[in-house]
Image (cartoon, grey):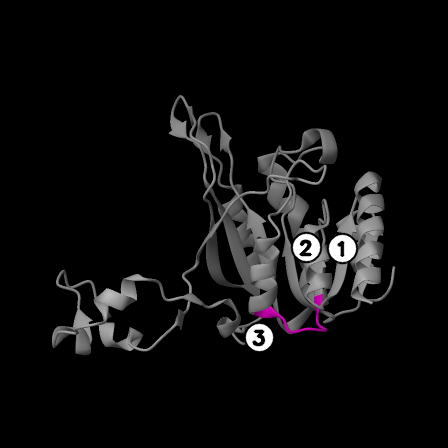
Amino acid sequence: MTEQSKIILGDSAEKLRGLDSDSVQLVITSPPYADQRNNTYGGVHPDEYVDWFLPIASELLRVLNPRGTFVLNIKEKAVNGERHTYVLDLIKALRRQGWFWTEEFIWHKKNSYPGKWPNRFRDSWERLLQFNKSKKFDMYQEEVMVPVGDWAKARLKNLSDTDKIRDESKVESGFGKNISNWVGRDMVYPTNVIHMATETGNQGHSAAFPRQLPEWFIRLFTRPGETVLDPFAGSGTTLFVAQEMGRTAIGIEIVPEYVEAIEARLGQLQKQLL
């Protein structure tokens, strides 16, 4: 493929060594969760997950730009009737490895259908963990602003005296708000809860991203021309979105059939963009 878009066949732990240090602005990926996708990726036992992922994370730390960001989509699973701690253990291990755990976003799957197990209900959310090399990194918050909402039309029409000052919480929590701060605003900053439907047309892959998810983080953490890496490319959604947004896209995927499909579609996208 061209320099603008590249998919590499092989194991991430090995293939990442071929990428230049400090060359990637955003890593966004969803590795196989513990004991998941066994038929495709073999599965990693929850007790072994941290040891499996740390060598990969070490290479990601090397290839990431000092002002870049690493976003990890992951979710713990239940083992013997209780939640396993491998995600929490991984966070602590990554911090010891040198990563700065900046933020945790929650992806609310707003189209999840009802369901239950004997001792719990169906998951309708996943974690998106943000890691950086330091506290100083590139972030373009204005790129992901959202409409203020119809509530503002009536709520801000007649402000009381209390609305015009910082109104401290009545339960002494330390929180407060100034309603007048929203006057005249058409757009506001979002929260760290991202409401998006799951992928319905999964492009022949058992766990495809909805394209809006990588797009949101690409807008937030990169500029056109910068490099986006997905070391577990899967069906290639992150690469396609990055290419369409004018970023350099690099993916690594271990399944040959997925790589072939990604190469074909990236080639089509390249022609369309040209």
Residue 261 at x, y percent in the picture: 81, 44
Residue that sits furthest to the right in the current view: 1
* Residue occupying image coordinates x 62% and y 47%: 209
The answer for how far apart the CA atoms under marks 3 and 2 are is: 19 Å
Q: Is residue 224 magenta?
A: yes
Name the residue beneath numbered marker 2: 238
Earlier in the chain: of badge 1 and badge 3, it is 3
Residue 4 shown left or right of residue 46 in the figure = right
Prevailing SS of the magenta stretch: loop
Q: Amino acid at mark 2?
A: Thr
Determine whether label 3 and label 2 are within 8 Å by CB: no
The answer for how far apart the CA atoms under marks 1 and 2 are is: 8 Å
SS at circle 1: strand
Between marks 1 and 2 in the image, the one whose residue lies nearer the viewer: 2
Q: Is residue 173 magenta?
A: no
Magenta span:
221-227
**Is residue 269 or residue 162 the one in the foreground?**
269
Residue 109 shown left or right of residue 151 in the figure = right
* Residue occupying image coordinates x 80% and y 61%: 272
Name the residue beneath numbered marker 1: 251
